[in-house]
Image (cartoon, rainbow, N blue to C red):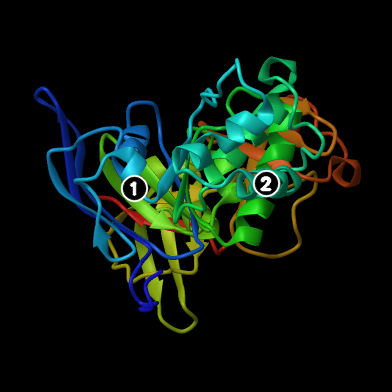
């Protein structure tokens, strides 16, 4: 371990990768600190899995640097890098027992037999598979196989753990459970982890930071809150969660109090600007469905009150989702406590209140 804590555990410097003439990674640069869990997320074909495989040494690249704990490793094969990968299909050996799968790398490194046994037992406890060391892989559930794959990846205590959509083969309930287990394990071990998923909600729930990718380019790097509440462009806003967009033009900017007014197709909207805007700027309002309040009677006072008509309503227990028409614009609204507000019916006339602390993007 490097004694210089200011050096990131993992550094990617200007990574370029071509498949024939198609550039799939277009100058990727990223620093990952020790003990951090960073998730690569984006649509299919964005380059996230290719980038993970570049880090692990499984995919060659055309230019750039991969630096691990202050040392360049891009010239090394996978088995000589201090990284370990857990593949989407787990890549377990079906003819071996759980213990034999976990100990495979230790035997290759010629560990002593008693040390191997101690390490395997330690890892079985760590992933909550005590007593299953002698079981064959095909006798395990999907969740148990996933834990074996993680234990095997951790056996040699890598400096970076690489997880390539490790939960995609699990059902929804088990996926949720294992997501929490991986996060707790990662935090306990303080192991630097790169997690790849196409599921934006999974990325939001598990990550210290999220790297949003599109067509081989990093669109934004930030905490889950930053990515969700302050997306840097329309693609990120629409990719991570549901969103309402409203085009508008800045009509007024008041410095005291700090407030601006936008003219939109549904009327004037006041907002607290997060950056400097000028009168005449073309903007796009980013309004999350759960931030909009619905009511049957017009609020006594306040700004950003719109009239609309319920088009579609869907009750799903703890949440009610509505599509509402407002002056020809369709808006999605989530009401998180439908028992308190009651269920709004289709064609019902209602009032919407838009918050002032909405995120606003400047259009090019």
Cα distance between the residues tagged 1 and 2: 21 Å
Left or right, residue 168 beside residue 17: right
For label 2, the SS is helix
Which quarter of the rendering shows the N terminus?
A: bottom left
Q: Position of residue 43 (x, y in %)?
A: 40, 30
Q: Residue 330, relative to residue 72: is it above or below?
A: above
Q: Which residue occupies the foreground of this view, 280 or 197?
A: 197
Tell me if mark 2 has few (under 14), some (14-19) or many (20+) residues whose alpha carbon lies within 10 angstroms of its own. Answer: many
Q: Position of residue 354 (x, y in %)?
A: 60, 54
Mark 1 and mark 2 lie on one chain; the one further toward the N terminus is 1
Q: Which residue occupies the foreground of this view, 247 or 84?
A: 84
Name which quarter of the figure residue 216 lies in.
top left
Left or right, residue 11 beside residue 189: left
For label 1, the SS is loop
Q: Tell me if residue 246 can be seen.
A: no
Tell me if mark 1 has few (under 14), some (14-19) or many (20+) residues whose alpha carbon lies within 10 angstroms of its own. Answer: some
Name which quarter of the figure residue 150 lies in.
top right
Q: Position of residue 318 (x, y in %)?
A: 83, 39
Name which quarter of the figure residue 32 lies in.
bottom left
Residue at x 45%, y 37% (from the top left corner)? 108
Q: Position of residue 9 (x, y in %)?
A: 38, 63
Residue tagged 1: 81
Residue at x 48%, y 30% (from the top left corner)? 87
Q: Which mark is residue 123?
A: 2
Q: Which mark is residue 314?
A: none
Left or right, residue 217 beside residue 349: left
Query: Outermost residue toward the bottom?
Result: 256
Q: Which residue occupies the foreground of this view, 92 or 308?
A: 92
Q: Which residue occupies the foreground of this view, 230 or 77?
A: 77
Query: Outermost residue toward the left?
Result: 21
């Amino acid at each position: 371990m490097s004694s210089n804590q200011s050096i990131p555990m993992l550094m990617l410097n200007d990574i370029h990768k071509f498949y024939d003439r198609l550039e799939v990674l277009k100058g990727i640069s990223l620093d990952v600190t020790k003990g951090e869990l960073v998730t690569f997320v984006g649509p299919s074909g964005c380059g996230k899995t290719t980038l993970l495989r570049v880090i692990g040494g499984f995919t060659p690249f055309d230019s750039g640097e991969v630096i691990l704990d202050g040392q360049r490793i891009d010239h090394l094969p996978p088995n000589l890098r201090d990284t370990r990968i857990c593949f989407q299909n787990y890549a377990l050996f079906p003819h071996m027992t759980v213990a034999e799968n976990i100990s495979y790398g230790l035997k290759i490194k010629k560990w002593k037999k008693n040390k191997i046994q101690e390490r395997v037992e330690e890892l079985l406890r760590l992933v909550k598979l005590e007593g299953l060391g002698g079981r064959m892989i095909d006798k395990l559930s999907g969740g148990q196989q996933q834990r074996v794959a993680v234990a095997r990846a951790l056996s040699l205590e890598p400096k970076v753990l690489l997880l390539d959509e490790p939960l995609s083969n699990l059902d929804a309930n088990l996926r949720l459970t294992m997501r929490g287990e991986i996060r707790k394990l990662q935090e306990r071990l303080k192991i630097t982890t790169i997690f790849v998923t196409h599921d934006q909600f999974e990325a939001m729930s598990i990550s210290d930071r999220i790297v949003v990718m599109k067509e081989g380019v990093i669109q934004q790097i930030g905490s889950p809150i930053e990515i969700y509440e302050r997306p840097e462009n329309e693609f990120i806003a629409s990719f991570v969660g549901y969103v309402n967009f409203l085009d508008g033009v800045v009509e007024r900017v008041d410095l005291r109090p700090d407030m601006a007014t936008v003219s939109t197709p549904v009327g004037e909207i006041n907002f607290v600007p997060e950056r400097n805007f000028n009168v005449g700027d073309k903007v796009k309002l980013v309004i999350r469905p759960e931030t909009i309040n619905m009511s049957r009677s017009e609020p006594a006072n306040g700004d950003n009150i719109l009239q609309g008509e319920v088009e579609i309503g869907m009750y799903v227990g703890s949440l009610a989702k509505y599509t509402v028409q407002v002056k020809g614009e369709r808006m999605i609204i989530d009401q998180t406590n439908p028992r308190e507000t009651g269920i709004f019916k289709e064609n019902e006339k209602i009032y919407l209140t838009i918050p002032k602390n909405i995120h606003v993007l400047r259009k090019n």
